[in-house]
Every structure is written in structure tokens, then in C-alpha cells.
Image: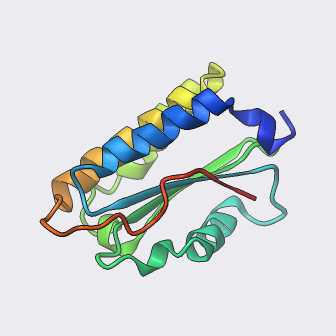
């Protein structure tokens, strides 16, 4: 799969956006998915750049989570902001990546993303529960580069 547009079907994208909506429903946290074809940078460094470009570092409670994929390179990274990183168990992101990778290896990219979103959402709900007046600070749509 070399083209970002071919990575997920429209129906799969809609299911992922719905998973983000559901994951964010009971939390003040924000989850985004960014997909691009390739990167010439270290994947984690590129993910941090995208995190900043999407304004994820500007959330009030520093509780944004980005799932970044470079599809041609077969790389993905999960970035959490300081607020969420300070409270989740040390191995949380690695365990989440392992769960996603298991689905990805089977070619189940939609399910892998939904599993990662759901796990991140569970932690965000635990540590950053929805408060009266919380607003959705960032778009739920999948961004593409």
C-alpha cells in the first residue's frame, strides 16, 4: 500500500472516527490519528512534529494522544502529551502498540487503530473524566500528510 488514500476505505475511516468520538465521550482528553505515506525522519520525531502541527500540545490538560502511521514505511508511533504520560503505567504505550501491531500483522488496520483508540480512551476516561462544560478541543477526523 503506497498511497495514503488507499490505506483505509471510507467505511473504515468512518468507523475509526466513530471510535474516537466514543473514546472521547467520557473524557476531556483528545485523540487524533494521522496517516501519511512515508517520512524521511525518525518516526517518533516525525510524530512529535505532527503532534505539534495539529495543535495537540495546546490542550488545556495536556492530555492529547496521537496515533501516527507512515504506511509505506510500516511504522507507527503513539504520542501522549505530558498530562497523560505522567499518569499511565510506564508500559502502557508499549502494551498498546503491541495490541495494535498484532492486528496490523494480520492486515486488520482498522481494528488495530480502533484497539489503540479504545485503550487510550479508557486511560483518558480513568485519569481525565468528562467534566461539565468540557468541549471537544480538536477534530476527530483522520488527518493525512
Residue 103, compared with residue 98, is above or below; it is above
Could you say which is closer to the camera, residue 86 or residue 14? 14
Residue, far left = 132
Numbered disc total: 0
Give residue 52's position: percent from left, percent from top. Answer: 57, 76
At 63% from the left and 48% from the top, the residue drawn is: 76
Residue 25, compared with residue 51, is above or below; it is above
Instruction: Kindly tell me whether residue 95 is visible in this rendering.
Output: no
Could you say which is closer to the camera, residue 55 or residue 88? 55
Quarter holding the C terminus is bottom right
At 24% from the left and 64% from the top, the residue drawn is: 87
Instruction: Kindly tell me whether residue 137 is visible in this rendering.
Output: yes
124 on left or right of 44: left
Location of residue 82 by image quarter:
bottom left
Give residue 34's position: percent from left, percent from top. Answer: 62, 54
Give residue 33's position: percent from left, percent from top. Answer: 56, 51
132 on left or right of 90: left
Instruction: Identify the coloring.
Output: rainbow
Quarter holding the N terminus is top right
At 59% from the left and 36% from the top, the residue drawn is: 13
At 23% from the left and 67% from the top, the residue drawn is: 134
Residue 36, compared with residue 60, is above or below; it is above
Give residue 30's position: percent from left, percent from top. Answer: 38, 61
100 on left or right of 42: left
Residue 66, compared with residue 1, is above or below; it is below
67 on left or right of 73: left
Amino acid at each position: 500500500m503506497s498511497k495514503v488514500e488507499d490505506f483505509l476505505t471510507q467505511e473504515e475511516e468512518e468507523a475509526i472516527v466513530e471510535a474516537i468520538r466514543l473514546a472521547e465521550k467520557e473524557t476531556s482528553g483528545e485523540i487524533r490519528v494521522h496517516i501519511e505515506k512515508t517520512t524521511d525522519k525518525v518516526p517518533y520525531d516525525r510524530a512529535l512534529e505532527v503532534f505539534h502541527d495539529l495543535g495537540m500540545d495546546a490542550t488545556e490538560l495536556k492530555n492529547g494522544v496521537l496515533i501516527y502511521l507512515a504506511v509505506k514505511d510500516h511504522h507507527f508511533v503513539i504520542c501522549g502529551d505530558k498530562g497523560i504520560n505522567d499518569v499511565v503505567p510506564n508500559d502502557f504505550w508499549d502494551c498498546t502498540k503491541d495490541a495494535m501491531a498484532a492486528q496490523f500483522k494480520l492486515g486488520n488496520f482498522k481494528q488495530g487503530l480502533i484497539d489503540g483508540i479504545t485503550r487510550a480512551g479508557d486511560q483518558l476516561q480513568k485519569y481525565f473524566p468528562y467534566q461539565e462544560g468540557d468541549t471537544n478541543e480538536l477534530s476527530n477526523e483522520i488527518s493525512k500528510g
